[in-house]
Image: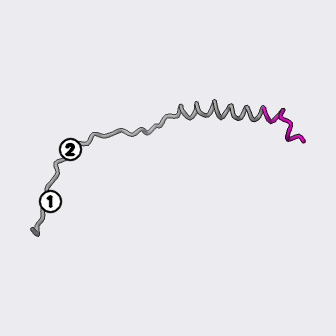
Amino acid sequence: MPQLDPNPWLSIFLLTWSVFLVVLPTKILAHNFPNELILQITEATKANSWNWPWL
């Protein structure tokens, strides 16, 4: 049965997993987010008291 011959398939399998384990993580970790969130400093606003006209 030719499917059980590991000669061509083992090398393809090892090459594929070497790409997954070496090349792709370096590309993923090198990714930069162009739109980083910038925290804005908000000034404390003075709270206005409520007007209860029915009391």
Label the magenta part by its dominant secondary structure.
helix
For the record, the magenta segment spans: 1-10
User: Could you say whether the residue bearing mark 1 is in a helix, strand or loop?
Assistant: loop
Query: Along the polypeptide, which appears first: circle 2 or circle 1?
Result: 2
Query: Does residue 21 appear left or right of residue 44 in this picture?
Result: right
Query: Does residue 3 appear left or right of residue 52 in this picture?
Result: right
Q: Which mark is residue 50?
A: 1
Query: Does residue 23 appear left or right of residue 30 in this picture?
Result: right
Q: Residue at x 47, y 37 (%)?
A: 33
User: Could you say whether the residue bearing mark 2 is in a helix, strand or loop?
Assistant: loop
Q: Residue at x 52, y 34 (%)?
A: 31
Residue extending furthest left? Answer: 55
Q: Residue at x 84, y 32 (%)?
A: 7
Residue extending furthest bottom? Answer: 54
Query: Does residue 45 appear left or right of residue 21 in this picture?
Result: left
Identify the residue under disc 2. 44
Q: What amino acid is found at the position of numbered circle 1 in the picture?
A: Trp
Q: Is 22 a magenta residue?
A: no
Residue 49 screen position, x and y as percent = 13, 56
Q: Residue at x 49, y 34 (%)?
A: 32
Q: In which quadrant will I find the C terminus? A: bottom left
Question: Is disc 2 surrounded by few (<14), some (14 to 19) or many (20+) residues within 10 Å?
Answer: few
Residue 35 or residue 18, whichever sits in front: 18
Residue extending furthest right? Answer: 1
Residue 49 or residue 3, whichever sits in front: 3
Residue 27 screen position, x and y as percent = 58, 32
Tell me whether the residue at label 2 lies in contact with that at label 1, contact meaning CB atoms closer than 8 angstroms. no
Q: What amino acid is found at the position of numbered circle 2 in the picture?
A: Ala
Residue 5 or residue 36, whichever sits in front: 5
Residue 53 screen position, x and y as percent = 10, 67
Alpha carbons under labels 2 and 1: distance apart: 18 Å
